[in-house]
Amino acid sequence: QLFYPEWSQPVLQMLFVGAYILFAPFVGQFADSFAKGRVMMVANGLKLIGAGCICFGVNPFIGYTLVGIGAAAYSPAKYGILGELTTGDKLVKANGLMESSTIAAILLGSMAGGILADWHIMAALGVCAVVYAGAVVANLWIPKLPAARPGQSWRFRPMTHSFFSACTTLWRNGETRFSLVGTSLFWGAGVTLRFLLVLWVPAALGITSNAMPTYLNAMVAVGIVLGAGAAAKLVTLETVSRCMPAGILIGVAVIFFAIQQALLPAFALLLLLGAFGGFFIVPLNALLQERGKHTVGAGNAIAVQNLGENVAMLLMLGLYSLAVSIGIPVVGVGIGFGVVFALAITALWIWGRRK
C-alpha cells in the first residue's frame, strides 16, 4: 500500500481544476458538435476509466486527471442541454432543479464516501466506479437531440480561435458579462469558504473534530437547495436583477458567521448563507445558458463560464493562502473575505445597472 505526502492532496485538486482550464477551449465545441446526451455518456465513461485506474493500482494522479477531464467535458453538456430541452422561465426552474439535485448528490456522496473510506478505502473507490458505470447507462435515457453547431473544424488553431472568439462575444454582451462575473465570484468564494471552515472551527469553536467542517459545509449545501427552489419560483429571465441583493447578503452572512463563538448560530448563519447563494446563482446560470445558446452555443457558453469560475477559484484560494501565510487570524480573514465579496457584488450590480 502506497502512502502519499500531505502536499499530494492540494496537487490532486490542482490537477482537477487544471483540467477545466486547459480543456476549456475544446469541451464547449465537443458538447455543441454532438448530441449532448452522448457527450455526457463519453464524459462519464472517462470518469469510469479514471476511477477504475485508481482501483487497479495505476498512479492516482493519472486516474484523477482522467476524472477531471471527464468532469470538464461533462459540464458544458449537462448545463447546455437544459437550454435545448426548455426555454424562458422554465429554464430558471430547470436550473433550480439541476442545482438542487447536484447539491443533494454532493451531500450524499460526501457522507457515504466518509463512511466507506473509514471502513475500507478500496470499497469507497469501487463504489465510485460502480456509480460512474451507472451514470453511463443512465445517459441512454436522455433524449437524443440534434447537435447544436455541427460541422466545426477540429484543428487546434481554429478550435482555440473559436473559443476565445466566444469569450470575446460573451464579454461584450452586457447580460452575459454580468452572469460570467457573478458566477465566477460565487464559485471562487464557495471553494475558499470550504477551506476557511477547516481553520475556523478549531479557532472559533475549540472543536478539533474533522467531521465538524463537513457538517457545516452540509448546512451550506442544504441552504443552496432551498435558495435554488425559491429562485425558480420568484425570479424570471426578465427579473434576474432580483438575485443581486442575495449576493450582497452572502458577504454579510460571512461577516456575522466569522465572529460567532457558538455552534447553533453558526449552523443557522451557514444555512442562511447557502439560501442566499442558491437564490443568487440559479438565475445567473439560466441567463447565460439562454443568451449563450443564441450567440456562441450553450456548450461554448458553459465552457467559457467554467474557465472563469476555475480561474476565480485559483485566484481566491491564492489570496486566502497568502492571508493565512502572513499570519492574519482566521476570524480576520473571514471578516475581510465577507467585506470584499459584498463590495464586489455591489460593484457588479451598479456596473450592470449602468450598462
Image (tube, grey):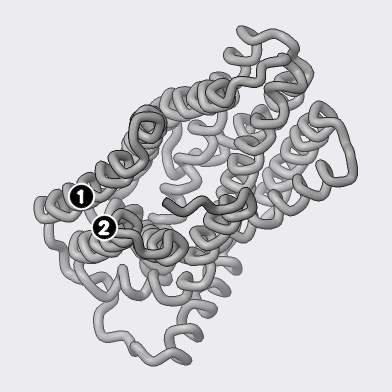
Please name whichever residue, 341 or 65, is drawn nearer the observer in this view of the structure: 65
Q: Amino acid at mark 1?
A: Ala
Q: Residues within 10 Å of mark 2 (few under 14, many from 20)?
A: many
* Residue 255 in the image, given as x and y percentages of width and height: 76, 25
Judge whether residue 232 can be spotted in this image: no
Q: Secondary structure at mark 2?
A: helix
Task: Tell me where residue 309 appears, x and y as whole percent.
Answer: 57, 55
Q: Quadrant of residue 111?
A: top left
**Foreground tag (2 vs 1):** 2
In the image: residue 251, left or right of residue 47? right
Q: Looking at the rendering, which quadrant does residue 328 occupy?
A: top right
Contact, CB < 8 Å: mark 2 with mark 1?
yes
Name the residue rendered at 46%, 82% in the picture. Answer: 162
Q: Name the amino acid type tagged 2.
A: Leu
* Between 282 and 271, the one nearer to me in the picture: 271
The vertical placement of 17 against 265, above or below, is below
Q: Is residue 7 visible?
A: yes
Residue 254 horizontal side relative to residue 272, left or right: right
Q: Is residue 214 above or below residue 47?
A: above
* Residue carrying label 2: 48
Say above or below: 328 vs 200: below
**Which quarter of the rendering shows the C terminus?**
bottom right
x and y, in percent, of residue 90 in the image: 30, 41
Image height check: is 85 above or below 298? above
Label at residue 313:
none
Badge 1: how crowded within 10 Å, few (<14), some, or many (20+)? some
Q: Which residue is mark 1?
A: 135
Q: Earlier in the sequence, mark 2 or mark 1?
A: 2
